Amino acid sequence: MKRTIKPNGRELFFDKDSFLVSKTDLRGRITYANQAFCNIAGYAERELIGQPHNVIRHPDMPRAVFKLLWDRVQAGKEIFAYVKNLSRSGDFYWVIAHVTPSFGPDRQIVGYHSNRRVPRRDVLENVITPLYADLLRIESDHRNAKEGLKASYDHLVRTATARHATYDEFIFSL
């Protein structure tokens, strides 16, 4: 399904009582997507199964946020994160994602599970959008992508922990 989708700047919204749910394997390939997720993303479930979850990644998303997310879930911890996604049509939609590792009977991680809800608008406008713009600028200011990611990640952690002890406390304070 590899194709380039050009963002068109139009925002999509979903019902505040809806949950967008997806599951992936250890490599981030989709193994399950509920109908609400399929509807907003613009794909049939059969088109999504086996695809990398980043098929819906919006180019406005800083890589540092995904580094933090993957570091946490691969370490067996949950995370809450604000994410801007890209639909098949080029429209975008915001979510507050709760991502958790899924464990097998032997307590080894076998995949990942994400529930997403409608985020608060004031948090997006006043905190997340400006923060993500800063992170993207930091990432692009470095000619070396690895250095840009490190600098952006460090800024994210500093911002989150400036008034709070942890990233989680920062997110829950919003």
Image: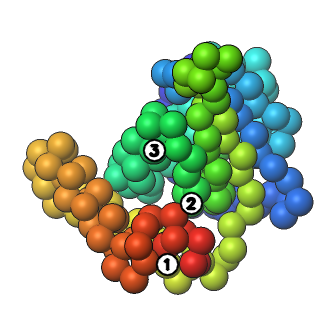
- Which residue corresponds to the image point at 59% horizontal and 71% vertical from the top-left? 172
Q: Quadrant of residue 82?
A: bottom right
- Which residue corresponds to the image point at 65% horizontal and 19% vertical from the top-left? 104
Q: Which mark is residue 82?
A: 2
- Which residue corresponds to the image point at 74% horizontal and 57% vertical from the top-left? 117
- Which residue corresponds to the image point at 34% horizontal and 65% vertical from the top-left? 156
- Residue depth check, mark 3 versus mark 2: number of the one nearer the observer: 3
Q: Is residue 173 above or below residue 151?
A: below
The local crowd at label 2, few if under 14, some if 14 to 19, many if 20 or more residues have their Cα within 10 Å, is many
Distance from disc 1 to disc 3, alpha carbons, whole Å, reads: 22 Å
> Residue 126: where, in percent of width, then height?
52, 83
- Comparing 71 with 15, the one in front is 71
Q: Is residue 43 above or below residue 154?
A: above
The reply to whether dot 1 and dot 2 touch (C-beta < 8 Å) is no
Q: Secondary structure at mark 1?
A: helix
Residue annotated with mark 1:
127
Q: Quadrant of residue 53?
A: top right
Q: Is residue 107 above or below residue 34?
A: above
The local crowd at label 1, few if under 14, some if 14 to 19, many if 20 or more residues have their Cα within 10 Å, is few
Q: Secondary structure at mark 2?
A: strand
Q: Which mark is residue 72?
A: 3
6 relative to 31 in the view: left or right: left
- Residue 2 visible to the viewer: no
Q: Which mark is residue 118?
A: none
- Comparing 122 with 55, the one in front is 122
Q: Amino acid at mark 3?
A: Arg
